[in-house]
Amino acid sequence: MVREIIIPDNEKYSIHIPKEYINQKVEILIIPFPSNDKVEKMENEFNPSKYYDVSNISKADIDNYLMNSRNEWENEQ
């Protein structure tokens, strides 16, 4: 796969096609790349650090929590 991010200065641009892609179907896409402002906004939408240590919870701990919650709910009925 070849990916190149450019800032074109006119309407024409030449590309280099690697030898291994010759005589094969290839797809060439031209899509706008987000500006730095948009990238920062996208990064701020999901912050993995908010979920620090979540993966350290064991399945047994989750099962126990769910069982206790279910039992509390059933006992209130």
Image (cartoon, helix red, strand yellow):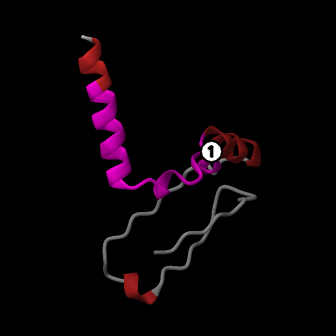
Q: Quadrant of the N terminus?
A: bottom left
Q: Is residue 29 magenta?
A: no
Q: Which residue lies furthest to the top in this view?
A: 77
10 with respect to 30 (left or right) = right
Query: Which residue lies most toward the front here?
Result: 75
Label 1: which residue? Answer: 50
Label 1: few (<14), some (14–19) or many (≥20) C-alpha neighbours in 10 Å: few
Please give the range of residues in magenta: 46-71
Secondary element type, mark 1: helix
Residue type at mark 1 is: Lys
Q: Residue at x 36, y 45 (%)?
A: 62
Q: Nearer the viewer, residue 23 or 53?
A: 53
> Magenta-highlighted stretch: main secondary structure?
helix
- At 29% from the left edge and 20% from the top edge, which residue is drawn? 73
In the rendered view, tell whether residue 7 sits above or below residue 1.
Answer: above
Residue 13: quadrant of the picture: bottom right
Q: Where is residue 33 in the image (x, y as percent from the top left)?
A: 63, 51
Residue 36 % position (x, y): 75, 49
Q: Which of 70 and 35 is in front in this view?
A: 70
Residue 63 against residue 12 in the figure, above or below: above
Q: Where is residue 71 in the image (x, y as percent from the top left)?
A: 26, 27
**Residue depicted at 48% across the width and 58% down the height:** 56
Q: Is residue 7 above or below residue 18?
A: above
